[in-house]
Image: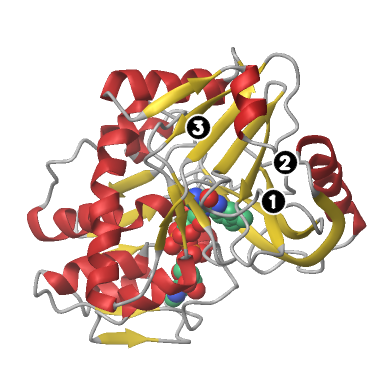
Amino acid sequence: MGAATSWRLAKRGVHVVCFDRHSPPHAQGSTHGESRIIRTAYFEGAWYVPLLQEAFPLWRELEAISGERILTMTGALMIGDATSDAVVGAQASAKEHGLDAELLDTDSLRRRYRGHVVRDGDVAVLDRQAGVLNPETAVGAMLAQVPQVVRDTEVKSIAELRSSFDAVVVAAGPWTPELIDWIPLRVERQVHGWFSLARDADWFGPDRFPAFVRQSGESSFMYGIPSLDGKTVKVGRHHDGETTTPQAIRRRVDDSDVDPLRLLTSTYLRGVSGHVTRTLTCMYTNTPDGHFVIDFSPEDARVVVISACSGHGFKFAPVIGDIAADLVCDGGTKRDISRFSASRFAASHVPGDHGDHD
Ligand SMILES: Cc1cc2nc3c(=O)[nH]c(=O)nc-3n(C[C@H](O)[C@H](O)[C@H](O)COP(=O)(O)OP(=O)(O)OC[C@H]3O[C@@H](n4cnc5c(N)ncnc54)[C@H](O)[C@@H]3O)c2cc1C
């Protein structure tokens, strides 16, 4: 989010300095692992769709100026039973915005996607305006547009910067609670793994196997990325991770992390072996309702804070960067960000409490 904001500000000719405590792209926060899903039939809320429709051309703009390949269109499947949030929500977004999406019944799902084990009653929304982004390449490409990136330099307080700059945008991901205490955030450890494909499983390529989110039960979500190397698929659980902090996170991945992923792949995917070639830990920074915060500080209208994660923010990065640039340059934005105000948590929030709010 910081790289995206810096890119969009630099594009407007603003003198912007991007500070990072690490040297991005890096694997210490939330933006690594070579792939992130972007989709449009958004089950999390139809109000995200206009932002998503803006995101695609901005990602293409970034590709054009950098010469890098960042977005691979694969389509996306939201799989679940007909009453699941993933299916119902994706359908509602598609209907409201007239999206290129299709409801697949159980038979069609079975027929078209051999890689999925389809149970009786499983259906899916096929979202054609969807694909996979490469986060490391994207961050590198955005920062290449920013004249001044100060790496390996921790900002200790917002006040420290505020005296030297006209405005400050805080996009500190899971470190945000160290800098501000007026958004209730819970940092969650997440593990994803790359599973080897069986020798004859040739149905996982990005041209034939859409990225997917699969809901089983009320709140259990897994996601998968088509095989980008021809040898593995990347699979993760959405949420269900332990509460952590960037300092305390358990980086070592053990059987208690891999076994649930192995169970999901053996239950829901056909042609994937139990062999894991790689794993990664990453962090979600969750708001209580799973939606983003993009807002001014209640104490200082020259400070903008972005917490655009809750496990689904990356796809929006260039739009959110542009919104932050609007807020800094114009004091407001024409995009509807009313759902992302921090004040929605004001009543329930005890300042300084960063406990488990989910
Ligand atoms: C496993 C996993 C899978 C995901 N899958 C998807 C997906 O498929 N699709 C999707 O859209 N989203 C997905 N997300 C969410 C998405 O990756 C995040 O929303 C997004 O990357 C958040 O970026 P960020 O800039 O907020 O945080 P970060 O990437 O963590 O960046 C914060 C930056 O701030 C720097 N920083 C922090 N504190 C300071 C300080 N005091 N001084 C200087 N620098 C500081 C850090 O070094 C870091 O570079 C996923 C997330 C994870 C973890």
**Quarter in which the C terminus is drawn:** top right
Residues packed near mark 3 inside 10 Å, few (<14), some (14 to 19) or many (20 plus): few
Q: Secondary structure at mark 1?
A: strand
Q: What percent of the width, then of the height, locates residue 291? A: 44, 37
Q: Which mark is residue 240?
A: 2
Comparing 91 with 7, the one in front is 91
Sequence-wise first label, 3 or 1 = 1
Query: Does 266 sit left or right of 343 as displayed?
Result: right
Picture quadrant of residue 112 = top right
Distance from disc 3 to disc 1, alpha carbons, whole Å, reads 24 Å
Residue shown at the point (43%, 28%) measured from the top left: 347
Residues packed near mark 1 inside 10 Å, few (<14), some (14 to 19) or many (20 plus): many
Q: Are marks 2 and 1 in contact (CB under 8 Å)?
A: no
Picture quadrant of residue 326 = bottom left
Q: Is residue 257 above or below residue 51?
A: below
Q: Is residue 105 above or below residue 321?
A: above
At label 2, which amino acid type do we have? Asp
Q: What percent of the width, then of the height, locates residue 223? A: 63, 43
Residue under label 3: 289
Comparing 179 with 231, the one in front is 231
Q: Is mark 1 within 8 Å of ligand 1?
A: no
Residue under label 1: 235
Sequence-wise first label, 2 or 3 = 2
Sequence-wise first label, 2 or 1 = 1
Q: What percent of the width, then of the height, locates residue 161? A: 30, 76
Q: Residue furthest right?
A: 255
At label 1, which amino acid type do we have? Val
Residue shown at the point (81%, 59%) measured from the top left: 199
